[in-house]
Image: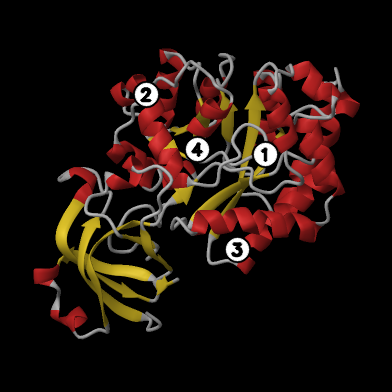
Amino acid sequence: MSSSRSLLRNLNLATMLPGGEPYGLVDGAAIAISDGRIIWCGSGDSVPPDYATWPQVDLGGRLVTPALIDCHTHIVYGGNRAREFEMRLQGASYEEVARAGGGIVSTVSATRSASEQELLDSALRRVDALLAESVSVVEIKSGYGLDVETELTMLRVARKIETQRPVRVKTSFLGAHAIPADYKDRSDAYIDDVCIPALEKAHAEGLVDAVDGFCEGIGFMSAQIERVFRKAAELDLPVKLHAEQLSNLGGAKLAARYGGLSADHLEYLDEAGVKAMAGAGTVAVILPGAFYTLRETQAPPIDLFRRHKVAMAVATDCNPGSSPMTSLLLTMNMACTLFRMTPEEALAGATCNAAQALGLTDTGTVEPGKRADLAVWDVEHPAELAYRIGFNPLHSRIFEGVAQ
């Protein structure tokens, strides 16, 4: 598929367009691609004559879907927390782990001490695992620097990833992630001294696509997050928020009030918060990896999202502490088994709804005008993508019309 024009034939297509058949299924389909864009798609029996003479690729009856999108990751960081994981399983309390240098303090220390190249090298290994499952877009957050320069370094590394791999990267500034030890009991001062100045510098350097925060009792209160969101609005940057993971502090409502792209986690969200998200078009990003790793028991309100027609995305939440996961296929399975999402909802969550959570309008579905970022799977039906555990049926990945 080196030609700028090609016609994919003999495939079954899941367009992921709403309405019509489940998954937007078209059996015996074809897709015309030119200069990295989808020009036409539909039944293989009705290919327009102009495209029928283009170089053809026979996909052997395989399933084609939009390439997957991981819309919530913390994939750039230093070190790992395997020893902390072991300590917890041996009965150590959170305090004991913290006294031993574990927790986010450990990741902040390792990230601050790592070079830019070391951070890039380790992040690329995690990105490669996602690409092996067809992922075409990865959202990457800062938030393990918690000082101005390291936050900027993390975002620079994130930007470099798309120069090293065939993938799109969307960055989120997460300076309001945790309170560093040197600002203990001075969280407002941290917002003034570190978070907002780092955001301003990152924006000036062109490193930020969106602004995020962690609205929890162990993070930042809604009034502090709102100060960051006001600065984001001044800089004309969209917002998203870690909200209602451990308690209900009204974070999702706050994100909705600022027209948030997404609110993420949401296990403790109530119906008022769901309605606020529905009114703002804010996507609910479901993160089963953290729920699983932390052995939580309260699931996000999936039925309320359905009832109020809030779009649901799913993402790995790849991070060194609560979700050390680099498989979006496993995430889809977890969303179904742990939260009772349907396989169609899970696939929509990793394609069209994930695109919406990142503010992207040129990807996530298979239709004319969209980027030709596609996944070719050795499966008979799209439900298999969420059904299998620890099995990757990807045949090939197509990025901007080029097979990888």
| Side of 155 relative to 136 (left or right) | right
Nearest-to-viewer mark from 4 and 1: 1
**Residue in the foreground of this view, choosing between 188 and 296:** 296
User: Helix, strand, or loop for circle 2?
Assistant: helix
Which residue lies most toward the front here?
Answer: 90
**What residue is rendered at 36% in x and 24% in y?**
305
Q: How many marks?
A: 4
The relative height of residue 51 versus residue 404 in the rendered view (above or below) is below
Q: Where residue 381 appears, x then y in whole percent?
A: 22, 50
| Label 3: how many Cα within 10 Å (few below 14, some 14–19, many 20+) | some
**Residue in the foreground of this view, choosing between 98 and 173:** 98
Nearest-to-viewer mark from 4 and 3: 3
The Cα atoms of the two marked residues, 3 and 2, are separated by 33 Å
Task: Report the residue marked by disc 2.
Answer: 302
The Cα atoms of the two marked residues, 1 and 2, are separated by 26 Å
Is the Cβ of the residue at disc 3 closer than 8 Å to that at disc 1? no
Task: Report the residue marked by disc 1.
Answer: 320
Residue 201 visible to the viewer:
no
Mark closest to the chain's N terminus, 4 or 3:
3
Mark closest to the chain's N terminus, 3 or 1:
3
The Cα atoms of the two marked residues, 4 and 1, are separated by 25 Å
Task: Report the residue marked by disc 4.
Answer: 261
User: Helix, strand, or loop for circle 3?
Assistant: helix
**What residue is rendered at 47% in x and 41% in y?**
357
Identify which amino acid the numbered label 4 is placed on.
Leu
Is the Cβ of the residue at disc 3 closer than 8 Å to that at disc 2? no
The Cα atoms of the two marked residues, 3 and 1, are separated by 21 Å
The Cα atoms of the two marked residues, 4 and 3, are separated by 22 Å
